[in-house]
Image (cartoon, helix red, strand yellow):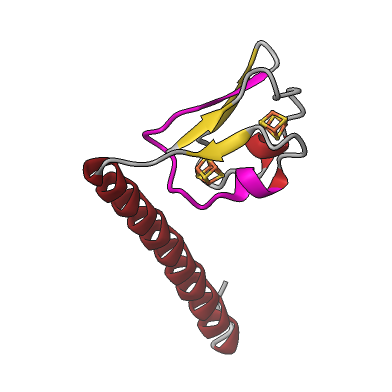
Amino acid sequence: MLRISAEKCLGCGLCVQNCPTDALRLFHEKAHIDTEKCIGCENCISVCPQGAIEPVALTELEELKMKIRSIRQKMEQLSQRVDELRQMKDRRKSSMWGGD
Ligand code: SF4
Ligand code: SF4
């Protein structure tokens, strides 16, 4: 779980741009987090020039939920990669046999 300090946040949007799950938004020039989307990668913490984002302790349930979201995201990435590889293989096969 993360906490964003409204006093420190300048609304630069770097955290939003670097969040892989679209969990951050700017609202009235301050970053806000959708904790249901966060996978705890901490990209936002490392890019924030203001040190405005801090981790806060999670309950066991929150930690478990975050791990599940993280696994789900990795599975989606893997599935996309498999699809890409399948398409590449199909294209190669059809070019070898002179198809479209
Ligand atoms: S990177 Fe930091 S300062 Fe910039 S919008 Fe995000 S929280 Fe605010
Ligand atoms: S920890 Fe990762 S997933 Fe969570 S808000 Fe920051 S960049 Fe997004």
- For residue 38, which quarter of the picture? top left
For image coordinates 62% across by 43% down, the residue present is 44
Any magenta on residue 47? no
Q: Is residue 58 left or right of residue 82?
A: left
Q: In the depicted view, which residue is nearer to us: 15 or 53?
A: 53
Any magenta on residue 33? yes
Q: Which residues are magenta?
A: 30-46
- For residue 25, which quarter of the picture? top right
For image coordinates 50% across by 80% down, the residue present is 89
Q: Is residue 1 left or right of residue 49?
A: left
For image coordinates 66% across by 32% down, the residue present is 52
Q: In the depicted view, which residue is nearer to us: 59 or 89?
A: 59
Q: Is residue 16 above or below residue 19?
A: above
In the rendered view of the protein, which quadrant contains the N terminus? Answer: top left
The picture places residue 22, in percent across and down from the top left corner, at: 53, 37
For image coordinates 63% across by 18% down, the residue present is 6
